[in-house]
């Protein structure tokens, strides 16, 4: 008789408790005892995690395991086949390392679930940066109402060009919302989208996106090709009146270069939800009135968090009942379901 699979929780479940508990119909639910990477590696080597077939992981569980890289993957028990990540972005996980392991470690993420909340956050940051709301919001709380001198006049989104870098689910969701503000939408992506997907947004070169956007929104995943895709040189090609919005991942934008560009008036403002070394925020951004800052709140709504947690659990259930992962990451799409089973 084969042993019941173990399902490991790395991080916390905050909403989908019932759905998580219901997984006990198909496996034993266990939690890692480790509090850091060294302990986690020891836990794996000790055999305590033998029998784990699938794991639920959160973004914050990087505190327990560190990055899912070669060193880590090499100590995972061979029984462990599925790593189900809660989040759209999975830059903490090295896809090639997982694919090349024997047997492969299949990884899923939660595409689509974060789209609305993240695009809403981008719209908030865009409006905040365009309208220059940051200074007066801070002044009011200091008891100084609008502030003295009065804040510089802001700008309407109406008639402005929104350039979307990365036209995936979040980019397309933001496009639809920005259209309601009367904006013209252009985008750049690895590939031009089919016209039904682009929905009337114009595909432009990276160069044209930089040169013509009044708002540049970063909506692309972080990987080796996109790290610092926006740095000094790219910022210099933007309009001096432009604002940049980042709800993707901090390192797609060179923060030090952004601080200099804002200080020197190379661009006009920024709205940021993500940072290069979270939870650290570059002091040059904190002191700069032209920057609207949020502490990585893109998906921070109860509806979206619940949706994302359920999505991870659905992936685990599907995989453990022989149907494969529902949303295997793009890099593993051609690894094949036959290998997965
Ligand atoms: O940061 C949030 C996500 O990747 O979904």
Image (tube, rainbow, N blue to C red):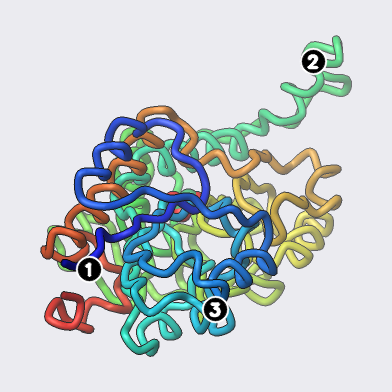
Task: Answer with left or right where residue 198 lies relative to residue 131.
Answer: left
| Contact flag, marks 1 and 2 (Cβ < 8 Å) | no
Q: Quadrant of residue 19?
A: top left
Looking at this view, is 165 or 57 the one in front? 57
Residue 180 picture location, percent across and down: 32, 34
Task: Answer with left or right where residue 251 lies relative to residue 216.
Answer: right
In the rendered image, the vertical position of residue 88 relative to residue 43, given as above or below: above
Query: Looking at the image, is mark 3 or mark 1 earlier in the sequence?
Result: 3
Residue 279 picture location, percent across and down: 72, 49
Q: Which residue is mark 2?
A: 141
Query: Looking at the image, is mark 1 or mark 2 earlier in the sequence?
Result: 2
Q: Which residue is pictured at 62% across the width and 66% down the height?
A: 66
Mark 1 vs mark 2, CA separation in Å: 45 Å
Mark 2 vs mark 3, CA separation in Å: 45 Å
Q: Which residue is mark 3?
A: 69
Crowd band around label 3 with a 10 angstrom C-alpha radius: few (<14), some (14–19), many (20+): some
Q: Quadrant of the C terminus?
A: bottom left
Q: Which residue is pictured at 33% across the width and 38% down the height?
A: 177
Element type at mark 1: loop
Question: Of the residues tagged 2 and 3, which is closer to the observer?
Answer: 3
Residue 89 picture location, percent across and down: 45, 60
Q: Looking at the image, which residue sits at the far front?
A: 1
Crowd band around label 2 with a 10 angstrom C-alpha radius: few (<14), some (14–19), many (20+): few
Q: Report the disc number at residue 193.
A: 1
Looking at this view, is 307 or 124 the one in front? 307
Looking at this view, is 54 or 301 the one in front? 54
Q: Which residue is pictured at 64% across the width and 51% down the height?
A: 241
Query: Looking at the image, is mark 2 or mark 3 earlier in the sequence?
Result: 3
In the rendered image, the vertical position of residue 125 relative to residue 218, given as above or below: above
């Amino acid at each position: 008789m084969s042993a019941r699979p173990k399902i490991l929780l790395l991080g916390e479940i905050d909403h989908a408790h019932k759905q998580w508990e219901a997984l006990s119909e198909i496996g034993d639910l266990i939690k890692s005892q480790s509090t850091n990477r060294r302990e986690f590696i020891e836990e794996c080597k000790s055999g305590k995690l033998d029998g784990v077939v699938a794991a639920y992981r959160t973004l914050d569980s990087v505190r327990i395991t560190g990055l899912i890289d070669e060193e880590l993957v090499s100590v995972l028990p061979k029984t462990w086949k599925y790593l189900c990540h809660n989040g759209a972005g999975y830059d903490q996980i090295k896809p090639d390392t997982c694919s090349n392991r024997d047997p492969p470690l299949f990884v899923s993420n939660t595409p689509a679930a974060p789209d609305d909340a993240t695009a809403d956050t981008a719209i908030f940051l865009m409006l905040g940066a365009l309208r220059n709301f940051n200074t007066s919001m801070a002044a009011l709380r200091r008891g100084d109402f609008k502030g003295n001198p009065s804040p510089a006049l802001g700008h309407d989104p109406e008639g402005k060009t929104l350039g979307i870098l990365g036209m995936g689910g979040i980019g397309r969701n933001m496009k639809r919302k920005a259209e309601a503000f009367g904006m013209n939408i252009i985008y750049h992506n690895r590939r031009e989208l089919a016209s039904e997907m682009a929905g009337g947004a114009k595909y432009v070169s990276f160069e044209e996106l930089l040169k013509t956007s009044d708002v540049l929104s970063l909506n692309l995943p972080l990987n080796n090709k996109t790290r610092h895709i926006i740095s000094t040189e790219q910022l210099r090609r933007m309009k001096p009146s432009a604002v940049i919005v980042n709800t993707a991942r901090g390192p797609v934008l060179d923060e030090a270069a952004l601080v200099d560009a804002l200080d020197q008036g190379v661009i006009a403002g920024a709205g940021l939800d993500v940072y290069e070394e979270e939870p650290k925020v570059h002091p040059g951004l904190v002191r700069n009135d032209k920057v609207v800052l949020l502490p990585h709140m893109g998906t921070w709504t109860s509806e979206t968090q619940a949706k994302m947690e359920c999505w991870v659990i659905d992936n685990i259930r599907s995989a453990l009942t022989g149907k494969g992962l529902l949303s295997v990451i793009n890099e593993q799409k051609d690894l094949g379901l036959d290998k997965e089973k």
